[in-house]
């Protein structure tokens, strides 16, 4: 079986395609470009706060913010869960409070300790200059010769002995957070679990004592 295609139809279709393509190009070319308004922060106080968030907001602070946020929201949802009975709501709320308080406390403390230790043993001339510029150290306190203070570079790789402050800061954050995660693998069982159990029992007793007088008054009023 032989299929014959008309050359005229092919040429017509190709012409239509070219017309459509050219029309599209002309439409794109004639489309106006809208420029958005550029917002500029001029407040020095706001700029300092933004810089602080970018430079000094450590992983310990981040853990504290997440813990406080969880403490202000999750127990409320558990206590007002109408799909469960009152006893389950009380137990669930107490357990949530215990987990958040124990986890946040140990998480913040361990992160802060690990970051502080990493910071102490990863110093170089550029970190000293940064402290001098920020007026956190006096000129007489600045270390200029680290050959006599090699212990302050124990955690600093050989290739980063002359690194900039920003590079050192990024390394400190990563190293401190990694060390904290390793430490917390053990503290989750040794500290978090028993503290969570203790706090859960404590809050259950508190909530139960608080709700018992209300129940008795309701019964007496009904009589």
Image: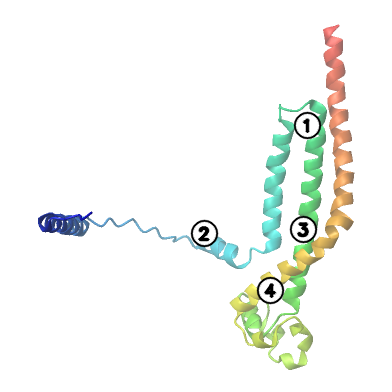
Q: Earlier in the sequence, mark 2 or mark 1?
A: 2
User: Does the residue at mark 2 contact the one at mark 1 (Cβ under 8 Å)?
Assistant: no
Disc 3 and disc 2: Cα gap in Å?
Answer: 29 Å
User: Does the residue at mark 4 contact the one at mark 1 (Cβ under 8 Å)?
Assistant: no
Instruction: Select label 4 or label 1 by which is in front.
Output: 1
- Residue 89: numbered disc: 1
User: Does the residue at mark 3 contact the one at mark 4 (Cβ under 8 Å)?
Assistant: no
Q: For the residue labelled by badge 3, is the local secondary structure a helix, a strand or a loop? A: helix
Instruction: Select label 4 or label 2 by which is in front.
Output: 4
Asked if residue 109 lies left or right of residue 145, the reply is right
Q: Quadrant of residue 16?
A: bottom left
Give the residue number, with chain letter if any, for mark 4: 172
Asked if residue 172 lies left or right of residue 211, the reply is left
Q: Percent position (x, y) of residue 6?
A: 12, 55
Q: Earlier in the sequence, mark 4 or mark 2?
A: 2
Disc 4 and disc 1: Cα gap in Å?
Answer: 42 Å
Rendered position, 172 above or below 201: below
């Amino acid at each position: 079986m032989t299929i014959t295609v008309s050359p005229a139809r092919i040429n017509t279709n190709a012409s239509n395609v070219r017309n459509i393509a050219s029309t599209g190009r002309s439409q794109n070319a004639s489309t106006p470009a809208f420029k958005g308004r550029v917002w500029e922060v001029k407040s020095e106080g706001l700029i300092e706060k933004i810089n602080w968030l970018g430079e000094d907001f450590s992983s310990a602070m981040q853990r504290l913010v997440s813990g406080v946020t969880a403490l202000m929201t999750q127990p409320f949802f558990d206590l007002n869960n109408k799909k469960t009975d009152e006893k389950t709501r009380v137990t669930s709320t107490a357990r949530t409070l215990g987990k958040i308080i124990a986890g946040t406390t140990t998480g913040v403390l361990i992160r802060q300790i690990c970051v502080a230790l990493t910071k102490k043993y990863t110093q170089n001339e550029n970190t000293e200059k940064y402290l001098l510029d920020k007026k956190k150290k006096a000129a007489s306190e600045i270390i200029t010769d680290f050959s006599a203070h090699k212990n302050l570079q124990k955690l600093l790789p050989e290739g980063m002995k002359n690194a900039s402050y920003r590079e050192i800061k990024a390394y400190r954050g990563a190293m401190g957070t990694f060390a904290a995660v390793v430490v917390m693998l053990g503290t989750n069982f040794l500290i978090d679990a028993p503290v969570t159990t203790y706090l859960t029992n404590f809050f259950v007793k508190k909530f139960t004592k608080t709700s018992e007088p209300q129940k008795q008054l309701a019964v007496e009023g009904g009589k």
